[in-house]
Amino acid sequence: MVTHPSLHGLDLCWSSLHGLLSELSDEQWSTQSLCPDWDIAGVVMHLISVEEMLLDRQPLEFAERLPFEEIAGFTEAMSSLSGAQLTEKFASVTAARSTQLSKMSEDDFATPVMTPVGPGTYGRFMNVRVFDFWVHEQDIRTPLGLPGHEGGPAAERSIDEIRMSMPYIAGKRVGVPDGSSLRVHLTGPVAGDITVRVAGRAGLVDDLDETSASITVDSTTFALLACGRVNPQSRIDSGHITWSGDQELGERAARNLRFTM
């Protein structure tokens, strides 16, 4: 039995979300989330459904595919539950998953499986689950005006998930020209720089003294933009994201960070 890094991130997300859900009023449960198809209750049912799909199954069962078609049935079974009942269901399912994951071996987490981002390992899949839970928590918190859990290990893990996709974002979405570079300066709560240089193809670099353009943004806004949750113009107008250097490239980057939804 080992402690995979994803377990701590999942426990943090589950604890933070449970605390948040426990405080919501009936009216808040029906508030539109940042996901166009779901209100707050819909987001929570989605999160629970994926964990129910994973519950009591060995990693090898996901070697070829993920049975996402099962999610609709799990969600339908919860459709009549109240907010309080969904909170209780969330707590019981995540507790069962926590017990299951805590008993897994190093070999279990190293098992090759299909993940939502392509072939990987079960451990990689669980890191993606940290990202999913953290982003969906922000999907709930942002429209309710209840900021929280913007920093710490789960947030850092989630921002790192986006960092790994920055070569794609810079090369394909932003269109950084060959020979040029782009820096994302994160002001916090997860602070740091993400730098991409295009030399034939886009790639992450540790740092450059100067980049062609640089965007400055807080880590939560960066995540919401990268996940397509908010309108870039609204965040530009509010000053949450700014740019320097090559003005055309900086603005293009600020408007085209989205890589998933």
Image: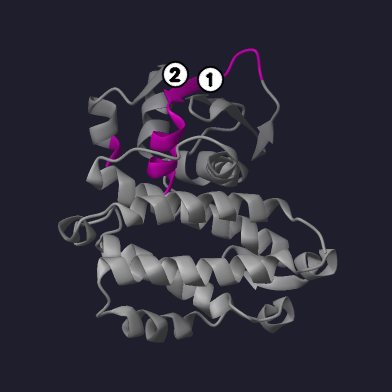
From the viewer's perspective, is 73 left or right of 9?
A: left
| 66 shown above or below 246 | below
The numbered disc on residue 246 is 2
How dense is the environment of label 2, judged by Cα within 10 Å: few (below 14), some, or many (20 and up)? Answer: some
Q: Which residues are magenta?
A: 208-232
Which quadrant would residue 115 be assigned to in this image?
Answer: bottom right
Label 2, secondary structure: give it: loop
Residue at the spot x=68%, y=67% of the render?
101
| 31 shown above or below 173 | below
N-term mark: 1 or 2: 1
The numbered disc on residue 212 is 1
Where residue 142 appears, x then y in whole percent?
29, 43
Cβ–Cβ below 8 Å for labels 1 and 2?
yes
How dense is the environment of label 1, judged by Cα within 10 Å: few (below 14), some, or many (20 and up)? Answer: some
Towards the viewer: 137 or 131 = 137
Residue 12 is one of the magenta-drawn residues: no
* Residue found at the very far left of the displayed protein: 27
Towards the viewer: 219 or 11 = 11
Q: Amino acid at mark 2?
A: Asp
Towards the viewer: 77 or 95 = 95
Quadrant occupied by the N terminus: bottom right
Where residue 218 appears, x then y in whole percent?
43, 28
From the viewer's perspective, is 94 left or right of 39?
A: right
Residue at the spot x=35%, y=36% of the render?
255
Where residue 133 appears, x then y in whole percent?
48, 56
From the viewer's perspective, is 261 left or right of 196?
A: left
Quadrant occupied by the C terminus: bottom left
Residue at the spot x=76%, y=65% of the render?
109
Where residue 60 appears, x then y in whole percent?
74, 80
**Distance between the alpha carbons at the discs numbered 1 and 2:** 6 Å
